[in-house]
Image (tube, rainbow, N blue to C red):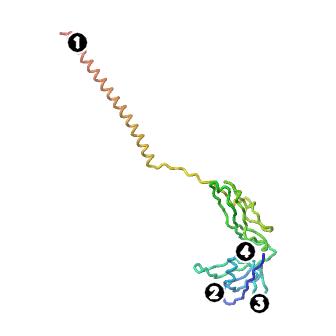
Amino acid sequence: MEKVPLKATSRQERGKGPSRRLRTAGLVPTVAYGRGSDTLTLTVEHDALGAILLSDRGRNTIIDLDIEGSDNCPVMVKDYTVHPISRQLLHADFIRIDENVPIEVEVPFVTTGKAAGELEGGTVLVTVRTLRMRCLPSAIPEFVEHDVSALEINDDIRVRELAVPPGAEPLLPPDRKIVIVQPPRVETEETPEGEEGEEGAEGEEGAEGEDGEAGAEGEGGDAAADGGKDREGGKDRKDRKDRKG
């Protein structure tokens, strides 16, 4: 990986007032530290640093920091702050690196192609957007990509299947699923509560009607039986009276 040159100047003044004046002049107050060396307070040009952060490699860019009156040193942007509205760079931290010692970085993860499972109604779920990796500064990939065209429904991609450049090691668990093709959702129709209530009411009315008819029939039968007994009793009394006469 090629290093990007960036000029820096030492600064003596600190505090809000001096920092505000530097920003007004198009400069960014910064510090550089790490590798057992003293912390340096510096300034760099706002637009030059902004161009590095907006490049494809962004914070993973290896910067050849050209400090006025001192030796150049390789650094990376460790952190930075911007104004919440204007997005102006307010401050940046540089960390010194040894080009022969592995470092940990966040690398973008991208997918290519259209999964076969999508044609069957499936959905591709990407669980990570960046991969934390350990590698030499010269081996930092711009991004890691994987073709998902062959994935069917319920297929997945795991960390161990990724093609990473030599000298780079993903720090996520090897069996971690980072792409999953989910099956289509099956929607079930719900019966409105009102319809269920009407059906229940109709059933109850039918039951009551049948019971009512049965009850009426039973009562009618009992009345008829009682009437028959009365007539038989009257006939017996008349026969006995005639015999006496």
Who is closer to the viewer here, 40 or 26? Answer: 26
Is there CB contact under 8 Å for labels 3 and 2? no
Work out which residue is located at the far left of the displayed protein and give it.
245
Who is closer to the viewer here, 170 or 222? Answer: 170
Kindly identify the amino acid type of the residue bearing the numbered disc 1.
Arg
**Which tag, 3 or 2, sits closer to the chain's start?**
2
In this rendering, position of residue 80 left or right of residue 220: right
Kindly identify the amino acid type of the residue bearing the numbered disc 2.
Arg
Q: CA distance from mark 3 to mark 1?
A: 151 Å
Residue 215 position (above or below residue 195): above
User: Circle 4 sits on which residue?
Assistant: 60
SS state under label 1: helix
Question: Residue at image x 72%, y 88%?
Answer: 10
Q: Residues within 10 Å of mark 3 (few under 14, many from 20)?
A: few
User: Circle 1 sits on which residue?
Assistant: 240
Give percent across and percent down for residue 77: 71, 78
User: Circle 2 sits on which residue?
Assistant: 23
Is there CB contact under 8 Å for labels 3 and 1? no
